Image (cartoon, coloured by chain):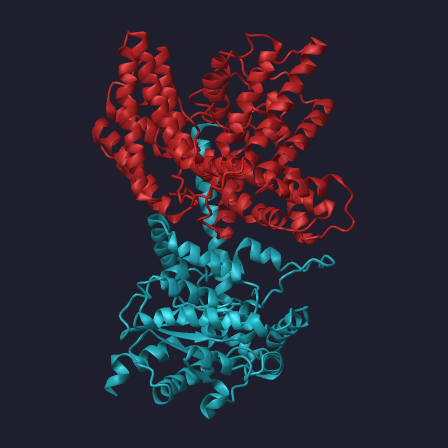
Chain colours: A red, B cyan
């Protein structure tokens, strides 16, 4: 089910009503669990079996991992969990990709092997819920948190509909304790949740789908060399589209959960105001980057095994992070570019020996996953967020932020292109004067993209040290009311409900 | 801001939104434009799912925009008792839908194929992508999409401003007179009054369009613009034969399953007709299509009752003309093509 659909509106109203009726807490949790299964099954009912399988296996394996004292048996249990979760992910997401590459390889070796193309449908959200369940079993193995006592709570943790399909990727300690005691949104949470839902839908429906998807699709769907202006406008349009699409989804997820009285972790913090790539990954898809940090980068050795091993670990982490996004080498290159940027940034800091900022992955940086839109539940001292920010809003930092944004846009070329041929062609059109290139965008489209991206970058810069709800809180109520109503009217006038979120395919 | 202030902002937002949208709806209703449904993939898929109705109770129509304007569905259904299932698509090649229906083993019904030569025999009609998207959508519809469609149907039947093609934010912005960028193809914008859609997917011109020759001339200018664009030459030789082969293969599949297929050439007039008859001579295209596939066909010029329509903008019939055309088409189909009709007409 999509947040931007009439079905969701009806569904959510029913869920809210049921959640606020005087049922027992257990009944309410069962209601939420059933609602979450309906939310998922509304897309493709048979795939709910995978979700059940993953839930049941990890619940029991997790318990056994925590109580098992025999090291060998413990490792065996972990391997079973990893094979179960990653095996399912590999089959559905990477099966075709692996077969295709294997075929290329054996053909290069002279073996005439041409298997039929597998027709595998990717279950929505499999990458997200796999990571959610994986972190539980790994935590159990490390004894970093206690096992969930009831299968109802564990099922709800895995399946809770706001985060199920496209995150934020939650950890057991973030959500499971919230299921232990009765929760119901107070009036402030309810209104703020509705505000975040409105904001998320505005970003998705009006800005991503309505304003930016068209120019981005036109440019990336073009099969000829483009004029430099068109190539850049297409990349900038995609840059805005993917932010509004994914941050919009996250905002809807956090808002929907808040309306029910639950707090989900923050996933975006004005990433296009990032000064450098360390900063960027603290602001973009925060729950994924912190997951990769805790469950991949640190187990690989992090920065504890010397300078060169740190670079290697960064590259491995980002390459796999790229592959997580999709079964295509273009995603791997996208991850590699980010890894390269991070390494270069670290090298500069190491050389200058005056790096006040921390590297991207540092053990114990819990603010990333604790941060929330909800100020009432996670009050940070005024102006203190993000706490590690060492980039004051100066002109030089703004220029550095623009430079970071420029390099991020280069990576988006690989992320959006269907293949390397298209990516090279786009880069050529962007960076080589191409007077013979074809113009494909109208003046109106160029104006729309330019205006939105300009406002987006400026807004990110101005808000980089704060969050949405505190800013909304500071506004006079009548001004917030006007802004909110403009968003609602533009959502209603956009009229393009039903467009799938980009991150559903991951 | 205090909690109550945040709530006040929410109430104000709700109030202002309702006022703004109600005012907009009120303004649009003052223009006397009728309710129109979005002719999108969800509506098409809704009709596509109906093709499995028994052969003696339904007829499926495929083609381009002409069949959507020219077939008056209430007239057809009143006369024949047959349910008319409209799957025609504007600016699109009906062979795409024919291919989809032929592949569908469950489809065994009656099929009427409207032929607009430039689209039917062309390589790539301008809106083929839209048709392919609709076919894809139908085959992968999710339960939530079906439910959303039903809710949307109720809302669209009540509110004029929910007409995406004409009153969405993007549609309105697109009407801002911004100069065309040299060499960038910009799809011409049809007047709002030209294209309304019933829930049955029957298209109609609004009364204002029929009264205003200026609006009609705008559409004529659009047809002239399309005509002035460089076109590949009409297919001939092996290329044309390949088209005939593919049509015959698909038609045979449907007939082998017990289905019935007939071709219809709907009326056009003025320069549109001149251009079409010059570019696609009847003997080379229409006649050969019928002889090669072994299907019967209704060519509008062969029947006096439907041969003299003057289309308001050269290419499509007005709603009144559509009633006359459909009335006569039903009679012609029964008398000259022995086309099986629904129970109602059989009893007459």
Q: Quadrant of residue A407?
A: top right
Locate residue A400, reporting x and y percent.
70, 25
Side (left or right) of A488 relative to B153: right
Residue A113 to residue B248: above or below: above
Q: Count the marks: how many?
A: 0
Residue B157 to residue B205: above or below: above
For this orientation, the residue located farthest to the bottom is: B304
Residue A370 to residue A422: above or below: above
Q: Residue at x 51, y 17 (%)?
A: A297
Locate residue A368, reporting x and y percent.
50, 20
Q: Quadrant of residue A186?
A: top left
Visible residue check, residue A245: yes
Visible residue check, residue B59: no
Locate residue B281, reporting x and y percent.
58, 82
Q: Residue at x 32, y 19 (%)?
A: A177
Q: Residue at x 32, y 63 (%)?
A: B105
Q: Nearer the viewer, residue A23 or A238?
A: A238
Residue A143 to residue B14: above or below: above
């Amino acid at each position: 089910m999509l947040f931007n659909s009439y079905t969701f509106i009806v569904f959510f109203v029913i869920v809210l009503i049921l959640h606020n009726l005087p049922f027992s807490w257990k009944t309410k949790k069962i209601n939420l669990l059933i609602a979450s299964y309906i939310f998922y099954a509304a897309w493709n009912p048979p795939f709910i079996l995978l979700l059940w399988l993953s839930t049941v296996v990890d619940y029991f394996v997790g318990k056994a991992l925590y109580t098992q004292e025999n090291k060998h048996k413990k490792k065996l249990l972990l391997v079973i969990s990893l094979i179960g979760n990653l095996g399912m992910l590999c089959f559905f997401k990477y099966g075709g990709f692996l077969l295709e590459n294997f075929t290329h390889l054996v053909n290069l070796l002279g073996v005439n092997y041409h298997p039929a193309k597998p027709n595998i449908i990717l279950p929505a959200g499999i990458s997200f819920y796999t990571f959610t369940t994986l972190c539980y079993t790994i935590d159990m193995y490390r004894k970093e948190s206690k096992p969930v006592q009831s299968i109802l709570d564990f099922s709800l943790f895995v399946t809770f509909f706001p985060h199920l399909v496209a995150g934020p990727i939650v950890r057991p300690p973030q959500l499971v304790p919230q299921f232990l005691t009765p929760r119901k949104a107070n009036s402030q949470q309810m209104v703020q949740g509705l505000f975040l839902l409105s904001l998320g839908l505005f970003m998705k429906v009006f800005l991503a789908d309505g304003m930016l998807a068209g120019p981005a699709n036109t440019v990336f769907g073009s099969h000829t060399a483009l004029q430099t202006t068109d190539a850049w406008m297409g990349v900038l349009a995609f840059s805005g589209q993917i932010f509004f699409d994914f941050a919009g989804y996250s905002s809807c997820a956090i808002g929907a959960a808040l309306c029910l009285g639950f707090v989900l972790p923050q996933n975006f913090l004005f990433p296009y105001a990032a000064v450098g790539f360390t900063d960027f990954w603290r602001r973009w898809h925060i729950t994924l980057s912190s997951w990769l940090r805790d469950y991949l980068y640190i187990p690989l050795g992090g920065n504890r095994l010397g300078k060169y091993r740190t670079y290697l670990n960064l590259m491995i982490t980002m390459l796999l992070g790229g592959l997580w996004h999709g079964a295509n080498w273009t995603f791997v290159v996208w991850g590699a570019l980010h890894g390269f940027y991070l390494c270069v940034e670290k090298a500069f800091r190491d050389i200058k020996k005056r790096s006040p900022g921390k590297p991207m992955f540092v053990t114990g940086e819990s603010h990333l996953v604790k941060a929330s839109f909800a100020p009432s539940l996670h009050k940070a001292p005024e102006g203190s967020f993000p706490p590690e920010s060492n980039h004051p809003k100066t002109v030089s930092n703004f220029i550095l932020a623009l430079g970071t944004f420029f390099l991020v846009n280069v990576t988006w070329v690989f992320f959006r292109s269907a293949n390397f041929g298209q990516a090279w062609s786009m880069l050529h059109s962007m960076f080589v004067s191409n007077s013979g290139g074809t113009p494909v965008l109208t003046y109106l489209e160029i104006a729309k993209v330019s205006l939105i991206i300009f406002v987006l970058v400026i807004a990110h810069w101005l808000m980089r040290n704060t969050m949405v709800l505190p800013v909304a809180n500071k506004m006079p109520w009548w001004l917030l009311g006007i802004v909110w109503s403009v968003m609602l009217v533009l959502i209603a006038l956009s009229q393009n409900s039903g467009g799938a979120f980009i991150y559903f395919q991951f | 801001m205090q909690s109550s202030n945040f709530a006040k902002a929410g109430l104000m937002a709700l109030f202002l939104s309702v006022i703004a949208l109600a005012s907009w709806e009120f303004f649009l209703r003052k223009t006397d434009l009728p309710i129109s449904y979005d002719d999108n993939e969800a509506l098409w898929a809704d009709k596509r799912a109906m093709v499995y109705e028994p052969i003696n109770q339904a007829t499926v129509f495929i083609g381009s925009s002409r069949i959507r304007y020219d077939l008056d569905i209430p007239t057809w259904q009143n006369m024949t008792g047959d349910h008319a299932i409209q799957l025609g698509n504007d600016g699109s090649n009906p062979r795409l839908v024919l291919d989809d229906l032929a592949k569908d083993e469950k489809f065994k019904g009656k099929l009427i194929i409207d032929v607009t030569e430039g689209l039917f025999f062309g390589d790539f009609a301008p809106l083929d992508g839209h048709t392919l998207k609709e076919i894809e959508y139908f085959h992968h519809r999710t339960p939530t999409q079906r439910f959303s469609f039903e809710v949307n149907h109720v809302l669209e039947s009540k509110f004029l401003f929910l007409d995406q093609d004409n009153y969405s934010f993007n549609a309105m912005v697109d009407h801002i007179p911004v100069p065309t960028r040299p060499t960038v193809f910009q799809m011409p914008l049809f007047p709002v009054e030209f294209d309304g859609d019933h829930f049955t997917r029957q298209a109609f011109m609004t009364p204002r369009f029929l009264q205003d020759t200026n609006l009609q001339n705008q559409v004529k200018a659009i047809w002239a613009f399309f005509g002035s664009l460089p076109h590949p030459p009409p297919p001939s030789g092996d290329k044309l034969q390949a088209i005939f082969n593919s049509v015959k293969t698909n038609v045979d599949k449907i007939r082998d399953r017990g289905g019935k297929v007939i071709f219809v050439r709907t009326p056009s007039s003025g320069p549109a007709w001149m251009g079409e008859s010059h570019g696609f001579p009847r003997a080379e295209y229409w006649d050969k299509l019928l002889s090669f596939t072994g299907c019967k066909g209704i060519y509008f010029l062969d029947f006096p009752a439907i041969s003299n329509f003057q289309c308001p903008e050269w290419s499509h019939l007005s709603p009144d003309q559509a009633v006359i055309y459909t009335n006569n088409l039903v009679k012609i189909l029964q008398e000259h093509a022995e086309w099986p009709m629904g129970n109602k007409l059989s009893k007459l």
